[in-house]
Structure formats: structure tokens, C-alpha cells
Image (cartoon, rainbow, N blue to C red):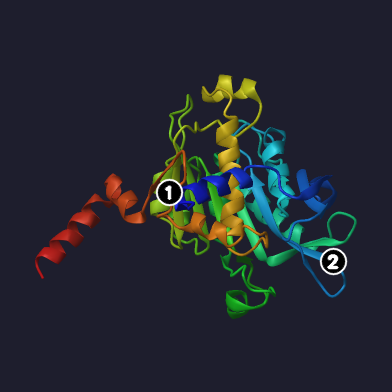
Amino acid sequence: MVTVAEKVKNLIARLGRPGPYDVNVGDLGVAGLAGRVYVPVSGTGGAARIGRRGRASVPGLVFGHDWKTGVDAYDGTLRHLASWGIAVAAPDTERGLLPDHRGFAADLESALQILTGVKLGTGNVVVDPARLYLSGHGMGAGAAVLAATGRVAADPAEKVAKAGKAAKAGPETPTLAGVISVYPSDTTPSCYQAARQVEAAGLVLGAGKAGAVPAGNARRLAANWRGPVVYRTIDRGAPAGLPEPLLRKALVGGSGPQFAVQSLIRALMVGFIAGDGAVDTTDAKACRVLRDAGTSVPATTTQTRRELIESLPEFGDITSALQQAVLKR
């Protein structure tokens, strides 16, 4: 009999391999924003939901890059997501020494609007506005949280965009199904403060190894999250481990090749989206366990929100006060 641990291990291995879709890469600049767009096209996947006009409706994700890192550095990761039936837009802005984090967050929001406002591929692919996700690495992870504060939580399991919470919010209120934050960095304004306003579900991944360049605090980000959140430490992950150029890893992040770590992160990203019902793969039901903070995933360490709060000094007084209140009852 296959144990739960073996099932999760096998699931991560499957999700870490390319999905069933072919991928077309386009220029986001055509829509007025520097960057790239990755579109799932022909394939045997089930992410696409065919509408009345014969157009395939797919989930959409916007990805933000790290400081001094362009979209090129994430080509493999973005192609991987698209191969699982997820349309991906990646702005290539704010690459300077002193980036504007608020401006980058605005670019991520613009990319979301572009995804839902145009027909992709040869015109037969559209993005479902009820299945939108923000994500990023480092600086981009923090900016994604800033951008998420402007949207209310959506229910991507609904078959139409105006159903569920999206309908309650009103037709003009933009919605968001989730946020994926990989090794988040500090931002101005603070992404930690912003996380307290994010209603959408979150997946926050922290690095198990220290980098050569000071990074942010993924635990603090997850502890401050307003909506449901899953936090995992990638045990062998380094802050600069997600970008693909090896030279940059060595010079900036003090990290060598991390192919296995990259595969793990990609699998967790796909699993987070598929487990929410946004991708109708045969593994969708199995992926639900990856959205449970209590599920053990190989090569990661999970902490509950309570454990995160207790580990951070700024919550110390609050925890102590609650304990005293319980003792006095």
C-alpha cells in the first residue's frame, strides 16, 4: 500500500516535470509593457475550459523578477508553468540599481490587466479573470504582495468569473485567486505591512540557506498574512537559487547550481494553483494536500502560523498577553 508520504513525493516529482502543453513565447511590449508572455497552446492538458466561441479559457499568473535580474533568468520556470496550462506574464521593468518597488507593483497589476484584456496565442486563448495569481522572487515577491492589496480574494473553483466572491465584490472590483512569494525581499513600502491586507490565499517559500546578499524575512511575511497561507522552508534553497544563470548565482547569491531546488519550487507553484481547482489536471484533487500547511513535503520544512508568530520578536508581547489572559480565566 502506498503511504501518504510516498504519494506526495511522487506528486512533486510529476509536477516538477514539464506539463502536457506546448508553449508559445510572446513580447509583452506589444501591449505597452516591457516583458514576456508565455502562452499554453496545443496539448492534452485540462487547464483550458472551452467557451461558447470555442476559445480556451486558462488561469493567468504574473511573475515579478528579483533585484538586478531580468526575465531571461527565469525562462525555464516560466515555460514550466505555461506547460501546465497557465498563461504567464512577466514584466521586465525596474531592473536598475535603485528600483521603485511601488512602481514595480503597479507594473505587475498592469500585466494582470493585460492578461485578461487581450486574446493570446492566435486569438483562441483567453485568461479567466476568476483564476488570476500574482507571484515573484525576491524583490518581485515583495512587489507581488504590494500589488495584491488592491484586489479581493476570488474563488477560482467557480466556473464563471462573476460567481462566488467575485460576484459579491461587484463586476468592477478586481479579484485575485492567490499569491506565491518565493524568497521575498524587503520592499518600500513594507510588504510585511501589506500582507495584513491580502485576503487571497498565499504560498510563501523561505530559503533554508543564507545568501551573500541580505534578503527579506519569509517567515515574517507569512505570519502577517491576512488570508489563508502555507509557509514552507526550502531546506537546501538559497535566496539566489531560483534564477537560472550560474554566473549570477556565484557572484550575487553565493549559490551554486540548484536544479533540484528549482524543480521543487516549480512543482510547489503548479501544485498550489492546481490544488485550488484552477487547473483541471488528473492530479488536481491530489494537489489539494499541497495547500495544507500540515502536509509534509520532501526537502521542505513547514511551520504553522502559530509557530511563525511565536518565532518572531514583534509578536512576543502579544503571545505573552494571550497566555496571561488564558491563565487568569
- How far is mark 2 from mark 1, CA to CA? 38 Å
Is residue 148 visible from the viewing direction of this image?
A: no
Q: Residue at x 66, y 64 (%)?
A: 131
Q: Counting other residues with Cα less than 10 Å from the Cα at mark 2, is it few (<14), some (14-19), or many (20 or more)?
A: some
Q: Residue at x 9, y 67 (%)?
A: 328
**Helix, strand, or loop for circle 2?**
loop
Q: Which residue is mark 2?
A: 55
Q: Amino acid at mark 2?
A: Arg
Of residues 277 and 318, the one drawn nearer to the viewer in this rendering: 277
Residue lying furthest right: 122
Q: Position of residue 304 (x, y in %)?
A: 36, 53
Quadrant of residue 18 within the rendered picture: top right
Q: Amino acid at mark 1?
A: Ser
Image quadrant occupied by the C terminus = bottom left
Quadrant of residue 286 within the rendered picture: bottom right
Q: Residue at x 79, y 51 (%)?
A: 39
Indicate whether 177 appears above or below 210.
Answer: below
**Helix, strand, or loop for circle 1?**
loop
Q: Residue at x 81, y 64 (%)?
A: 56
Of residues 57 and 102, the one drawn nearer to the viewer in this rendering: 57
Point out which mark residue 253 bears.
none
Is residue 246 visible from the viewing direction of this image?
A: yes
